[in-house]
Image (cartoon, grey):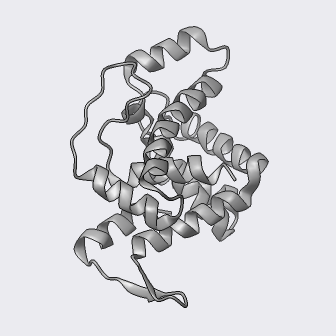
């Protein structure tokens, strides 16, 4: 369940590259992981994807007490393990969802979250809509870079991780600096949820 962290660590400590496919293209272990996560997210389909995200969100809020701060990682992983019941695709998708759950405060500043509380009839739905706008802005960068697969996502997120970017509070079209794992999780969630 901590694959994003593990893959990021391996990527920086041991930059191994292996050959795959008949064309013998080089695919990094990170990109291969991202491809598997995209496949898992797409395989869930919209209804199961939403149900898994909602189950983990509820667990983070109630069991793991993550209303204001990031929920305890061990608690959310245990909830995902119980929810997925050994389904490897579900666990890959849950890894992405957990990364996004724990990063919400980094993606949405305090004024934006306060505005959602004031304006949205359903806070969770408002939160998802606000995150989707940020993730869509990041996906636009991916589209401009040319690609929607694991290799393209990995390349964009590695490049973004090396550049400092700042945004004004409330600017939904701006995506500030984010670490590789958060960038990947956002793009897998967004791109994996669209066909």
Relative to 116, say whether 137 is above or below: below
- Residue at x 53%, y 63% (from the top left corner): 149
Percent x, y of residue 81: 61, 60
> What residue occupies the far top of the structure in this picture?
118
Is residue 75 something that shows in the picture? no
Percent x, y of residue 71: 46, 40
In this rendered view, identify the residue nearer to me: 81 or 176. 176
Percent x, y of residue 29: 41, 76
- Residue at x 57%, y 46% (from the top left corner): 190
- Residue at x 45%, y 67% (from the top left corner): 151
Is residue 178 something that shows in the picture? yes
Percent x, y of residue 157: 36, 55
Q: Count numbered badges in the picture.
A: 0
Q: Is residue 161 rendered to the left or right of residue 60?
A: left
Relative to 162, say whether 40 is above or below: below
Q: Is residue 56 rendered to the left or right of residue 108?
A: right
In this rendered view, identify the residue nearer to me: 103 or 131. 131
- Residue at x 38%, y 24% (from the top left corner): 109
């Amino acid at each position: 369940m901590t694959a994003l962290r593990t893959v990021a660590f391996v990527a920086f400590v041991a930059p191994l590259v292996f050959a795959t496919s008949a064309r013998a293209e080089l695919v990094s272990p990170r990109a291969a992981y991202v491809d598997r996560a995209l496949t898992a997210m797409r395989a869930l389909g919209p209804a199961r994807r939403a149900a898994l995200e909602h189950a983990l969100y509820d667990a983070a809020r109630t069991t793991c007490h993550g209303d204001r701060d990031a929920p305890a990682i061990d608690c959310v992983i245990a909830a995902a393990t119980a929810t997925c019941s050994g389904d490897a695709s579900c666990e890959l998708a849950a890894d992405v969802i957990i990364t996004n759950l724990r990063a919400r405060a980094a993606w949405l500043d305090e004024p934006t979250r306060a505005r959602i509380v004031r304006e949205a009839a359903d806070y969770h739905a408002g939160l998802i809509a606000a995150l989707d706008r940020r993730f869509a802005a990041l996906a636009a960068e991916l589209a401009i870079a040319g690609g929607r697969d694991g290799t393209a996502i990995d390349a964009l997120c590695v490049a973004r991780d090396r550049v400092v970017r700042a945004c004004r509070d409330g600017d939904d079209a701006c995506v500030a600096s984010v670490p590789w794992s958060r960038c990947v999780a956002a793009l897998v969630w967004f791109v994996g949820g669209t066909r």
